[in-house]
């Protein structure tokens, strides 16, 4: 028998195109990895354990959609029905087709259009076995499973709230075409199989056979012709879907598999646009999970959320404005089911688009620095909140720590604000200068009061000494008994600064410290889900009214359980929240200093402090 | 030149017909909040770079408004971008974006 009919052509050509296109893209992404990553990749694909781990992740994330299930069961069910349902339909369809073809090598279209080809008289021979009946049952069940997911997908466009989503992504034309054809594939298959089963009076499963009989009964046209048309339609929608897939959001299906392998081989985002970045960009499924959690919604900004930014990157149409319109708080990264590093993509684009002008920092002069056991770098922002510096100095005096306040009078920026503007090259001078100052002090620990500085010290400076944010430093002092604390019995809520929390994963130290002298409340959105205060230095395109809207939104969430004090560990957060005047905002250092019994402060004062430049008065005091 | 014990100052006349206002217009278009500036100088008072050099963002802005971009050209590259000026600004001007804009404008014009 000849298992060929003209209608298989659209499907076959579409599939061929898709395979060639994916092959070309995968090749492009792998070859444009950085040299180090290429080595990681080649050693990774030779390691069976890593391959197995990756395949396990592919199964759980791409087919089961575990992260979607955790987010919302309906959403998880919908995604799983499409992914796992279709996957099983293909696999079992292939196995089923082996019983009929009798060869090991089938044409790729044969299993897909099996029901069209098997209504041959020869097949009746197989009907006596239970195996084909089992397959007919299971294939119908899978089709029903996918159709139930399709119903949910349709519902989601109308009632996204049921799926835990307030907003859904605005799609492009290619997305709409791909979506429409994808949605048509399974109803077309159902109709084609049903009409065929109805026409022959056999060969259908528990769903297609009765439906086929019914359709044959009510449709007044020649059933074989209708069935044939349906097979043509089924093949056409499959073909169109395959051809539009690489240009639509559905490209995430093949790309995410590669991304999971990359990630498990230890490949990380780079500072420039590499094959890994392009893989991440194409892995975005535009599911829209990052839309609702974005605080820019509060400010009425709806065109620069991670999903839209990544779409623009993919279309090679990112404006400078869009790249700079983001708090870079990292909340979208935390919820992304694919694990796309949208913040580092954002910074990559800022680097590409920033003006090429060189900076001139020749004015920063190296002055001789005395040595100390602790170098204290308060950071630019702390100079606007002098009480933090005062408290830190007071605490270190009480604890008897010999310290050097590096940026007491003339503060040199750590460089991160420049990096957030995409000016890494320009920041280099400042980084080198600060590094020299810190090294000259020959201290054991570098303590900073500013999470922005802390993060850049950790990530970019490569310093040979311990780097601590003052939350960690103070906790160590308290633990070692160097600073006595008396409980203040106040209800305190802690706000995680973005760069300390999500940026540097310091969540527990500040909480443990606060727990030692106060009643710490738990907030609705905390730790990796914490809100940004709205003052972010990463944001360039919001005016102060928009920032205030975001700040008030964050305060609304933080003040839900009525705390007496809002504690934070970032001078920028303190300044931003403080100006709203809705609750007293205090830094950890201030709270610790206030909790030290009065007698200890008096006995310690004046004993240790040696100012950096004795001849100049402290800038902090004068502001 | 012969030293008479005094020197002639640079001519500070602002000729609104001849001066180049392209940067000023570009800045206002890019960051409209700059319109709110009252010239209080808080930005300059708190400036980290200002502690080392003559860098004066208030003056740069005033001169740009008058169409004199020479000082901007000389000094703007010294900004460290720390953002203190923006936090301290009583009018809530988005100053870091203004400085990015000046950079961009000088590059283009």
Image (cartoon, rainbow, N blue to C red):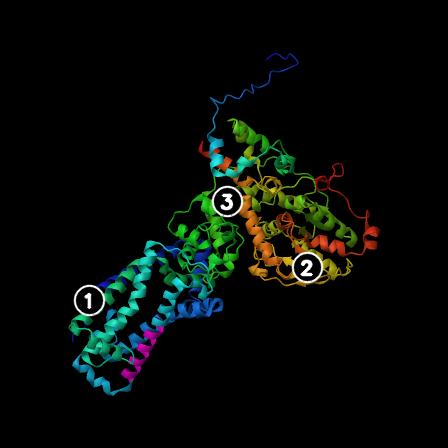
Question: Which stretch did the figure color magenta?
Answer: A131-146
Residue at x 55% of width, y 36% of height? B36
Between A411 and A46, the residue placed more toward the observer is: A411
User: Do pointers 2 and 3 mark residues of a single chain?
Assistant: yes
| Label placed on residue B58 | none
- Residue A529 lies, in percent from the top left, at 55, 60
Q: Is residue A48 visible?
A: no
Q: Secondary structure at mark 3?
A: loop
In this view, the mark in front (2 or 1): 2
Q: Label 1, label 3: how many angstroms apart (C-alpha)?
A: 54 Å
User: Which of the two discs, 1 and 3, labels the residue nearer the N terminus?
Assistant: 1
Which residue bears the numbered disc 1?
A: A7
Query: Mark 2 highlights which residue?
Result: A492
Q: Is residue A145 magenta?
A: yes
Dots 2, 1 in contact, CB < 8 A: no
Q: Relative to A159, is A451 on the left or the right?
A: right
Image point 38% across, 71% down: which residue? A81
Quadrant into which the N terminus of chain A falls: bottom left
Label 1 neighbourhood size at 10 Å, few (<14), some (14-19), many (20+)?
some
Chain of the residue that carries numbered disc 1 in the rendered image = A
Residue beneath disc 3: A541
Q: Could you tell me residue A592's position as x and y percent?
A: 73, 56
Asked if labels 1 and 3 share a chain, the reply is yes
Q: Is residue A387 left or right of residue A262?
A: right
Q: Magenta region's main secondary structure?
A: helix
Q: Magenta segment: does it hold A548?
A: no
User: In the displayed image of the protein, which residue is found farthest to the bottom?
Assistant: A128
Does residue A434 appear in this view?
Answer: yes
């Amino acid at each position: 028998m000849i298992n060929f009919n003209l209608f298989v052509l659209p499907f076959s050509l579409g599939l061929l195109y898709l395979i060639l296109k994916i092959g070309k893209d995968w090749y492009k992404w792998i070859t444009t990895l950085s040299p180090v990553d290429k080595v990681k990749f080649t050693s990774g694909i030779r390691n069976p354990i890593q391959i197995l781990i990756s395949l396990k992740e592919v199964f759980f994330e791409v087919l089961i959609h575990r992260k979607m299930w955790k987010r919302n069961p309906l959403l998880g069910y919908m995604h799983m029905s499409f992914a796992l349902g279709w996957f099983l339909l293909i696999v079992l369809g292939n196995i089923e087709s082996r019983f009929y073809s009798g060869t090991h090598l089938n044409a790729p279209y044969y299993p897909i259009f099996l029901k069209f080809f098997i209504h041959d008289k020869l097949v009746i021979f197989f009907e006596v076995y239970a195996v084909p009946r089992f397959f007919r049952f299971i294939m119908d069940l899978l089709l029903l499973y996918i159709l139930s997911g399709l119903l949910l997908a349709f519902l989601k466009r109308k009632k996204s709230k049921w799926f835990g989503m307030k907003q859904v992504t605005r799609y492009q034309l290619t997305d709409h075409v791909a979506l429409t054809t994808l949605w048509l594939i399974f109803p077309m298959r159902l109709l084609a199989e049903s009409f065929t089963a109805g026409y022959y009076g056999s060969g259908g499963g528990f769903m297609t056979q009765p439906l086929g009989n019914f359709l044959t009964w009510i449709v007044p046209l020649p059933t074989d012709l209708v069935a044939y048309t349906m097979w043509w339609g089924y093949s056409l929608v499959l073909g169109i879907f395959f051809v539009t897939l690489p240009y639509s959001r559905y490209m995430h299906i093949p790309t995410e598999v590669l991304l999971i392998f990359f990630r498990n081989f230890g490949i990380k985002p780079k500072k420039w646009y590499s094959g890994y970045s392009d893989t991440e960009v194409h892995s975005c499924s535009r599911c829209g999970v990052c839309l609702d959690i974005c605080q820019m919604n509060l400010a009425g900004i709806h065109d620069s959320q991670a999903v839209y930014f990544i779409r623009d990157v993919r279309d090679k149409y990112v404006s400078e404005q869009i790249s700079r319109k983001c708090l870079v708080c990292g909340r979208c990264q935390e919820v992304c089911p694919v694990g796309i590093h949208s913040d580092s993509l954002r910074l990559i684009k800022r680097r590409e688009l920033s003006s090429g002008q060189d900076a001139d920092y020749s004015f920063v002069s190296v002055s001789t620095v005395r040595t100390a056991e602790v170098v204290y770098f308060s950071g630019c922002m702390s100079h606007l909140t002098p009480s933090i510096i005062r408290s830190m100095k007071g605490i270190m005096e009480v604890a008897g720590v010999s310290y050097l306040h590096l940026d007491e009078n003339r503060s040199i920026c750590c460089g991160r604000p420049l990096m957030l503007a995409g000016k890494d090259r320009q920041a280099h001078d400042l980084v080198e200068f600060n590094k020299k100052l810190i090294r000259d002090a020959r201290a054991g620990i570098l303590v900073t009061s500013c999470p922005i500085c802390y993060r850049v010290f950790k990530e970019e400076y490569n310093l040979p000494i311990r780097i601590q944010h003052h939350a960690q430093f103070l906790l160590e002092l308290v633990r070692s008994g160097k600073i006595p604390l008396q409980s203040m019995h106040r209800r305190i809520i802690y706000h995680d600064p973005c760069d300390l929390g999500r940026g540097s994963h310091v969540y527990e130290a500040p909480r443990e410290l606060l727990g030692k002298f106060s009643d710490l409340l738990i907030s609705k959105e905390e730790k990796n889900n914490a809100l940004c205060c709205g003052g972010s230095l990463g944001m360039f395109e919001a005016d102060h009214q928009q920032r205030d809207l975001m700040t008030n939104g964050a305060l609304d969430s933080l003040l839900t359980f009525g705390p007496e004090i809002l504690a934070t560990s970032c001078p920028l957060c303190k300044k931003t929240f403080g100006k709203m005047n809705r609750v007293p905002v205090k830094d950890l250092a201030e709270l610790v200093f206030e909790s030290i019994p009065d007698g200890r402060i008096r006995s310690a004062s004046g004993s240790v402090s040696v100012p950096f430049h004795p001849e100049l008065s402290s800038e902090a005091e004068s502001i | 030149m012969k030293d008479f014990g005094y020197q002639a100052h640079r001519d500070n006349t602002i000729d609104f017909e001849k001066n180049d206002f392209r940067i000023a217009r570009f800045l206002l278009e890019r960051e409209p909040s700059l319109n709110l500036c009252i010239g209080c100088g808080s930005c300059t008072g708190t400036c980290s770079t200002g502690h080392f050099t003559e860098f004066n963002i208030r003056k740069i802005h005033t001169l740009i408004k008058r169409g004199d971009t020479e000082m901007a050209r000389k000094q703007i590259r010294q900004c460290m971008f720390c953002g203190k000026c923006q936090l301290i600004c009583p009018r809530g001007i988005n100053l870091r974006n203004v400085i990015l804009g000046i950079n961009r404008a000088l590059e283009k014009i």
